[in-house]
Image (cartoon, rainbow, N blue to C red):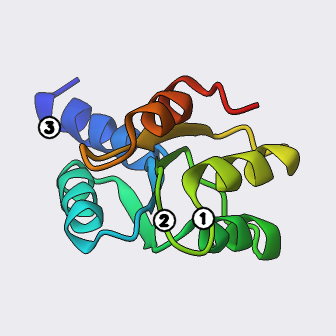
Amino acid sequence: MSSSASSSKGKRKLNAVKKLSVLIVANDDISQNSYILYLQKFGVETLGVRNGLMAFNIHDKTQMRFDLILMSSTMPIMDGIEATKKLRSMEITTMIVGITTPDDNEEYRKKFIYGSWA
């Protein structure tokens, strides 16, 4: 088999691989845009929303599902803890990674990161 034939075959296999999709839930434009730009460099499909309620509604009212959710801890309308609880109550099993800032209350950050709010 020639190298160009095997190279073409390899490219078809790569194109058939499902793209990773990530939902970024953060009300801070700088953080959200940083995550989006970084992930898109690697071909990751991204969607950014401003609060936990929007993240919940996407899952509740549409068929959209994600491979990963990056969830800010403190947001207006619905914070990361409440949004995570609601998503889990819908049996959404997507990995949710908590993102915090140094400005977040230390106790709240620990609860959010370690999942001890239950």
Q: CA distance from mark 2 to mark 1?
A: 7 Å
Q: Is residue 62 above or below residue 26?
A: below
Query: Nearest the camera: 3 or 45?
Result: 45
Residue at (14%, 37%) from the top-left corner?
Answer: 4
Q: Where, quadrant-wise, is the C terminus in this rendering?
A: top right
The reply to whether callout 2 and callout 1 are in contact (CB within 8 Å) is yes
Q: Amino acid at mark 2?
A: Met
For residue 75, which numbered disc appears in the image? 2
Q: Where, quadrant-wise, is the N terminus in this rendering?
A: top left
- Count all numbered tags in the image, as a single digit: 3
Query: Residue beneath label 3, please?
Result: 4
Looking at the image, is mark 2 or mark 1 earlier in the sequence? 1
Query: Nearest the camera: 75 or 49?
Result: 75
The reply to whether callout 1 and callout 3 are in contact (CB within 8 Å) is no
Looking at the image, is mark 2 or mark 3 earlier in the sequence? 3
Badge 2 marks a residue whose secondary structure is loop
The reply to whether callout 2 and callout 3 are in contact (CB within 8 Å) is no
Q: Amino acid at mark 1?
A: Gly
Crowdedness near tag 3: few (<14), some (14–19) or many (≥20) residues, C-alpha within 10 Å? few
Q: Amino acid at mark 3?
A: Ser
Badge 3 marks a residue whose secondary structure is helix
Residue at (19%, 68%) from the top-left corner?
Answer: 30
